[in-house]
Image: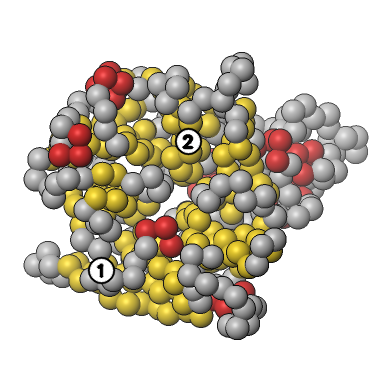
Amino acid sequence: MSNAAPTRQPLDDEDVVGEILCRLPPQPSSIIRASLAVKLWRNHAVTSAFRRRLRAHHHHAPVLGVYEKDARTLRFIPAFVSPDRIPPERFSLKVNPDHSYPDNWAVLGCRHGRVLIVNRTRRELLVFDPISGDCREVAFPADFVNKRHTTNGAVVCEDEGIGDSTKFRVVLVGVWGKGRDGDLSARIYSSETGVWGDLVSTPEHPKPCRVGRLPCTLAGNGLYWWLTEPHGCILHFDLGSQQLAVINRPPVADINIGCSRIIRTEDGGIGLAVLSYPTLRMYNRKVGSHGSTTWVMRKVVEMDKILGYPSSMEMEAGQTYITGYTEEAGAIVVSVHYGRKEDYLYVVQLDSMRYKEIGADFLENAYYPYANFYTGGPSALQLPAPLDNDGGAVEAEDGDASIPDDSNSEK
């Protein structure tokens, strides 16, 4: 009996531990607190496999905060309070700290744990990973520099940002040649090859044409942007076939691009969220067996009742906007302006209509929600340090070093 192997306890099994941990609330402190108990749990909590399990179980990642443009700084506004609050300075980024004057830059969107920034002064794109702190510079393709055209873009990762943090693709779309009468075109950059692919164009589309500035939506294998010309149409880029197409919006007169967002539906298709205060309408785009398409009204919500505002408040048209959207969380960002000094910003889940208020300074009319599963170091959230096997605290550096990592994990 003395030579018998020790009995393996259920909580020593990584599969069982994973099932337990992924059922905790997805807020940052929940998983980090649990992972402090045992070294095995800490090792498992930072693996790519566990983060995939989290995404599969919860479907939607939590909105950790929103980004806004503030002069030279990509400013992060936390969505949670302590102990889940991520300090703003940890996720913020100085875009041009070495210049005496601000560059001409803008945020193109957040997805798969990255933020995509276009810096027109330096003629480059920045792909920023707030969790790891990695910021990659991608030079514009030559024809982007030499020609005038309206442009937008997106960053995508095949592993949804869970695996290798260095692998991503950047998609640029715009109108190439002849001003607004040119052809809709796209280019794809691969971080693995470090080069831009060939120009993909489609001359078969309504003209004139202009790509809007709002971030795109990823649904299935397609990226979708609003077009400002033709008014209210949608640009679709298929990541697989690399083909471009223009989609007509619902035949409804009061759809204002500034008060609407293209959303991803539960079946992986696209829809629209349209806010005309106090009413929020949601549409689904249905594709028939023969390729015919129709827009169907799915839900109507009275936002004054959801947010607790009386309908008699002085909410005139143009005072309430949809200022952001993330398909990874299934949530919109709504700004409410009442009177001269009362401004409110909310993150609203479209499935449950639950909401969270965020404190913002309203420097911009656009906010970029950052949704991700955070399993970083406890010191980043001002939690106790983990204990080693002898009961002593494990020293931490830069917030994350107290959590062991492996070759397949991403902090």
Residue 189 visible somewhere in the drawing: yes
Residue 333's disc is none
Q: Circle 2 sits in a helix, a strand or a loop, which is it?
A: strand
Q: Quadrant of residue 159?
A: top left
Q: In the image, is residue 29 above or below residue 337? A: above
Apparent side of residue 104 relative to residue 50 in the rendered image (left or right): left
Residue 106's disc is 2
Picture coordinates of residue 356, whole percent (x, y): 65, 64
- Of 377 and 208, nearer the camera is 208
- Of 36 and 140, nearer the camera is 140
**Circle 2: residue type:** Ala
* Mark 1 vs mark 2, CA separation in Å: 29 Å
Q: Which residue is mark 1?
A: 250
Q: Quadrant of residue 309?
A: bottom right
Picture coordinates of residue 255, whole percent (x, y): 34, 67
Picture coordinates of residue 343, whole percent (x, y): 65, 61
Query: Which residue corresponds to the image point at 36% horizontal and 77% vertical from the top-left?
Result: 298
- Of 197 and 202, nearer the camera is 202
Asked if the residue at tag 2 contacts the one at tag 1, i.e. Cβ–Cβ closer than 8 Å, the answer is no
Query: Which residue corresponds to the image point at 60% horizontal and 64% vertical from the top-left?
Result: 337
Q: In the image, is residue 179 above or below residue 102? A: below
